[in-house]
Image (tube, rainbow, N blue to C red):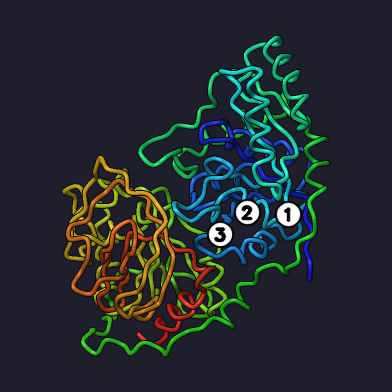
Amino acid sequence: MTGSVPRLVVAAPSSGSGKTTVATGLMAAWARRGLSVSPHKVGPDYIDPGYHALATGRTGRNLDAYLCGPELVGPLFLHGARGCDIAVVEGVMGLYDGAAGEGELASTAQVAKLLRAPVVLVVDASAQSRSVAALVHGFASWDPEVRVGGVILNKVGSDRHEALLREALDSAGVPVLGVLRRVPQVDTPSRHLGLVPVAERRSQAVEAVAAMAAQVEAGCDLRALAELARGAGALPCAPWDAAEAVRTASVPPRAVPDPGAAAPPATAHPVRPRPGPTSGPVVAVAGGAAFTFSYAEHAELLTAAGAEVVPFDPLRDEWLPDGTRAVVIGGGFPEVYGEELSANEPLRKAVRDLADSGAPVAAECAGLLYLCRELDGRPMCGVLDATARMSDRLTLGYRDAVAVTDSALAVAGTRMRGHEFHRTVVEPGAGTAPAWGVRAPERRVEGFVQRGVHASYLHTHWAGAPGAARRFVERCRTS
């Protein structure tokens, strides 16, 4: 089966060139014209897809050849783009930048080739004129399999500046499809891990997306860009399907419940009444402003594995959803909301009681911090005998990991790829039963496994390891 959706990739020579402004603005501009636009982001970024979703009204999805494997880029793209008129893929870093030491792996260029999609190169032209031709020529000719179909010039100072740039690019053979003038930066505030997520600044984010759309509408040839997108070739693959991924996943034998785990008492934690019967074990997934980092495919896989996925907000909810059998706590910014999270003592106790009962709990990065005894001196859930604090050091990069201890997600020896992105430190960095052995950049063990809890700094993408979701839900039924 093949799939074909008009699409293009928005890339740049380097970070800071204006990819997010152009990609998000283009999504919003086409959506304003009544098109159903499918938004995508190359790499493990969690924040940009939130702005993409705001621009299009559809879930922003990631395409990560490192975490999921190159073979899933096309199927995951088609899954996200079902029923859409056009798709926009925002690149990461520079066009040819990928996983360190891994060649083109996980680069925007690799994803563009896997999607058979034309590339629009966004160039910061603020400090150059004729040299822009050499720059564009170099990027367009570096890899013959990457088709650079057009250029959008950003931060152009004047009509004269634009004329010089266009004259130079005439010789490069790459058409200019847009010119954005040097204007005050769109208000998209940043902090220690990048842009502030949409969930934390909804009204300002709406204004920011509208401003991006206005810039693109004023400066870009939307008709020519759409025509370029229609020139993308058909993909020789079928859309990814969560149910099929779970059905065919290789899952080791079911983990034996911890005989030392106490059965949850009838009143272990307060619950929120919900009408109607449940369709399967309830998996409560943390959300809200403090926990915004998640991949949409995780909830889809859990549902396909037979769970009923119910969101909860640790900033607002004082109890877990009725019937909760397991909890998933992804990434985000608990350090920003430490005071509020600490003040919600009923929910902290509910999470601790559930974990103590042996129920499965999967926590990544922010979730790890939340399960610690304290964060920056403020009491957290106390599930783990560890403390967490903010740090000046940024830890960032892909990781090749191996499960060290049997857990609700994997058996020891399971290899999984992940990504770290944080400015915090947990002490100790690993429990007596670590979660992962990490091979690079240095060999170390990391994370915690105790009873049903699996807590780690590592962000993983379960589409690349659907057996984790299936095993997690099976553990719900046996714990």
Q: Which residue in the structure is indicated by mark 1?
A: 116
Residue type, label 3: Ala
Disc marking residue 319: none
Amino acid at circle 1: Arg
Q: Does 472 appear above or below 426?
A: below
Label 2: few (<14), some (14–19) or many (≥20) C-alpha neighbours in 10 Å: many
Depth check: 435 or 106 in front?
106
Residue 444 position by quadrant: bottom left
Residue 451, position as x, y percentages in the image:
26, 79
The residue under the point 22% across, 67% down is 383
**Res. 65 mark:** 3
| Quarter occupied by residue 346 | bottom left
Q: Quadrant of residue 399?
A: bottom left
Q: Disc 2 or 1, which lies upstream in sequence? A: 2
The answer to whether 342 is drawn above or below residue 163 in the figure is: below
Q: Is residue 453 above or below residue 73?
A: below
Using a 10 Å C-alpha cutoff, classify the residue at mark 3 as few (fewer than 14 neighbours), some (14 to 19) or many (20 or more). many
Considering the numbered disc 2 on the image, is that residue within a helix, a strand or a loop?
A: helix
Q: Is residue 243 left or right of residue 370?
A: right
Residue 32 place in picture, x, y as percent: 74, 38
User: Are discs 2 and 1 less than 8 Å apart at CB?
Assistant: no
Q: Are the residues flagged by discs 3 and 2 in contact, CB closer than 8 Å?
A: yes
- Of the residues under marks 3 and 1, which one precedes in the sequence? 3
Q: Quadrant of the N terminus?
A: bottom right
